[in-house]
Image: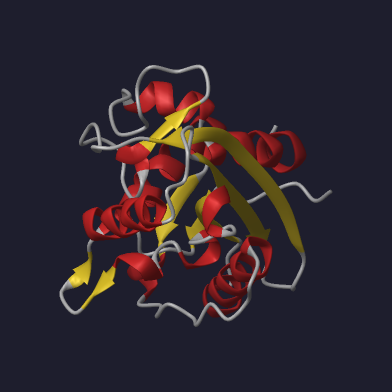
Amino acid sequence: MRRLESDRLVLASHNAGKLREISALVAPYGVRALPASEFGLPEPAETEESFAGNARIKAHFAARSTGLPALSDDSGIVVEALGGAPGVHTADWAETPQGRDFMQAMEKVWKMLESRAVPEPRRAHFVCTLCLAWPDGHDELFEGRVEGRLVWPVRGDRGFGFDPMFLPDGERETFGEMAPERKHAMSHRARAFAGLVAGCLA
């Protein structure tokens, strides 16, 4: 496994929430995460049907375009009773002509569960795949997941995406209610990041 020798990496994302989380995670290792927007990079088309495939597309595009190592995150929520949807299309479900509306996306998921009379607990899990890519084409992949169930009405205004409707197993607070440091300690992204640290940063 290749170690990251650079003190800078490009975060291949335009998501402000992910930038905040990942910047906080890499900072203790003396690494600064630079947003893709700082380099004027467009978002490449995510054409794969797996988290790993889409993470690779984003990381390699950013690494080739900037000449710096790049870290991408492809993540989403997988709802068991919906056959794994929205999965890799999690962000797509929030798209509107005015931008992303995750409240609308959460309502869509809940209405689908209601229409199918899915019994409680309505199981789901978050998946995060991190890809660290170098300009020479090498990459390393790390996956994390956290199991839980969906709740309604949504709870909390912290986090982002589907966080307010996701209650992790064994917890009383949704990801949308948790203090950021508590969520960061147990999230799917934190678990994937633990693999990245062990393999490439520590």
Q: Residue furthest right?
A: 1
Across and down, in percent, residue 59 comes to 59, 67
Position of 122 relative to 116 (above/below): above
Q: Quadrant of the C terminus?
A: top right
Occupied quadrant, residue 176: top left
Position of 66 relative to 177 (above/below): below
Along the line of sight, which residue is nearer the eye, 123 or 72? 123
Q: Give the colouring mode of the picture.
A: secondary structure
Q: Residue furthest front?
A: 117
Residue visible at 37% across and 55% down? 109
Residue 184 visible to the viewer: yes
Along the line of sight, which residue is nearer the eye, 195 or 75? 75
Q: Residue furthest left?
A: 98
Across and down, in percent, residue 107 comes to 27, 54
Horizontal arrangement in the rendering, residue 175 relative to residue 86 (left or right): left
Across and down, in percent, residue 60 comes to 63, 73
Along the line of sight, which residue is nearer the eye, 127 or 195? 127
Horizontal arrangement in the rendering, residue 35 relative to residue 28 (left or right): left
Position of 95 relative to 80 (above/below): below
Label tally:
0
Residue visible at 52% across and 74% down? 66
Across and down, in percent, residue 188 comes to 55, 39
Residue 30 visible to the viewer: no
Along the line of sight, which residue is nearer the eye, 93 or 98? 93
